[in-house]
Image (cartoon, rainbow, N blue to C red):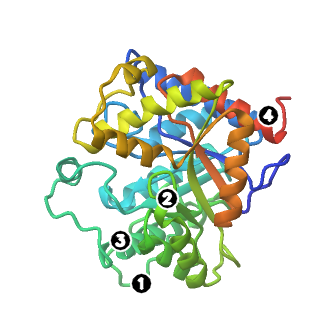
Amino acid sequence: MRAPRYGEAPTPLSVLDLVTVGAGRTATDALHTSVALAKLAESRGYHRHWVAEHHSMPGVASSSPAVILAHLAAHTTRIRLGSGGVMLPNHAPLVIAEQFGTLEALAPGRVDLGLGRAPGTDGATAAALRRTDQLNEGADDFPQQLAELTRFLDDDFPDGHPYARIHAVPGPVQSTSPGGVQSPHRPPVWLLGSSGFSARLAGMLGLPFAFAHHFSAQNTIPALDLYRDSFRPSALLDAPYALIGVSALATDDEQEARRQVLAAALNMVRLRTGRPGLVPTPEEAEAHRFTDMERDFITSWNSNVVHGTADQVRTGLDDLAKRTGADELMLTANAHSGDVRLRSYELIADAYGLPTPD
């Protein structure tokens, strides 16, 4: 569970991949970039490569994390792969247990199951996913769904339970069948969050916790404090383990970094105002006539994006790790171009002296 730290990085470093699609590019282009990124991350000592679940967003091609992770597993050998995360209320727990049991069979010992309770989209799309307009994500439903999923993963429903004779396959039941041999690995469950709810629940259950600092920075330290204060040791963890998602973009030139993050911020403006689209080019962003409200949003948004030259990004990440006490930093590079994203991870690895390819 606890990741190794390489070079001079303040914590282990990992990758959060949104499989972003830029204007003039296709989803195929974005998925090819994800494969290249997973290979790069593995060769440079990044510990995990997680894929997020989003829906009905033209600029994000990660609506099916399990499918993408299976593809990445075929192109890597060591790096941990996982969901950052699967939105549990969108799916039947049995389906998730089957999908991640399959992933574990494809990549034994290197699959993480990160779970969130938000829909990863707007309410109408969530209703279409779930085939209901009753969108329950509160204190009762999510813990119940989580408990059910955990039972399927461990194959340990008690006798008399309606699901006691139902088994997630691939899974532990195969070891109890005549002649059965089952992998000793089971994907560890992480809870994801952007507020205190999942922080407290992760602590109470003794699970690792991933906080979405990249879009909820004002809640980071309170949530991590709540997680640590609530933590109870479990079979998985004897002490708290928290990573935070961080928007970080390094370029060879400081001005270029500002151009790239402006384009990514314009994409967020459009998303937040109900006009999701492809990630615009820096040229489109520079030509855009921003309203005062849009400029205020962009100033606020980009204040939490660590960007600039590699040395500037290193300084920003060092400070963030010190302020939050995070055990791991998971970096997401939002940019129009896949080449810019790949270059960013290379520059950050170089800045910290992470391993070079074999």
- Residue 155: x %, y % from top left: 50, 70
Q: Quadrant of the N terminus?
A: bottom right
The residue lying toward the viewer, choosing from 81 and 203, is 203
In the picture of the structure, the residue carrying the numbered disc 2 is 217
CA separation, marks 2 and 3? 23 Å
Whether 66 is drawn above or below 202: the answer is above
Give how far apart the Cα atoms at labels 2 and 4 are.
Answer: 26 Å
Can I make out residue 77 in this image?
Answer: no
Of 219 and 150, which appears nearest the observer? 219
Observer-side mark, 2 or 3, equals 2
| Residue type marked 1 | Asp
Amino acid type shown at disc 3 = Phe
Please tell me which residue is depicted at 24% across the width and 68% down the height of the picture.
Answer: 136
Which badge, 4 or 1, is on the more N-terminal residue? 1
Residue 195 in sight here: yes
Task: Please tell me in which quadrant of the rendered image residue 117 appears.
Answer: bottom left
Residue named by callout 1:
159
SS type, badge 4: helix
| Residue named by callout 3 | 142
Could you tell me if the residues under marks 1 and 3 are in contact, i.e. CB atoms within 8 Å? no
Say which element carries label 2.
Answer: helix
Kindly report which numbered mark, 1 or 3, lies closer to the viewer in this rendering: 3
Q: Amino acid at mark 2?
A: Ala
C-alpha gap between disc 1 and disc 3 = 23 Å
Mark 4, residue position: 350
> For the residues marked 4 and 3, what is the alpha-carbon distance in whole angstroms?
41 Å
Tell me the crowding category of disc 1: few under 14, some 14 to 19, or many 20 or more residues within 10 angstroms, Cα based.
few
Comparing marks 4 and 3, which lies closer to the viewer? 4
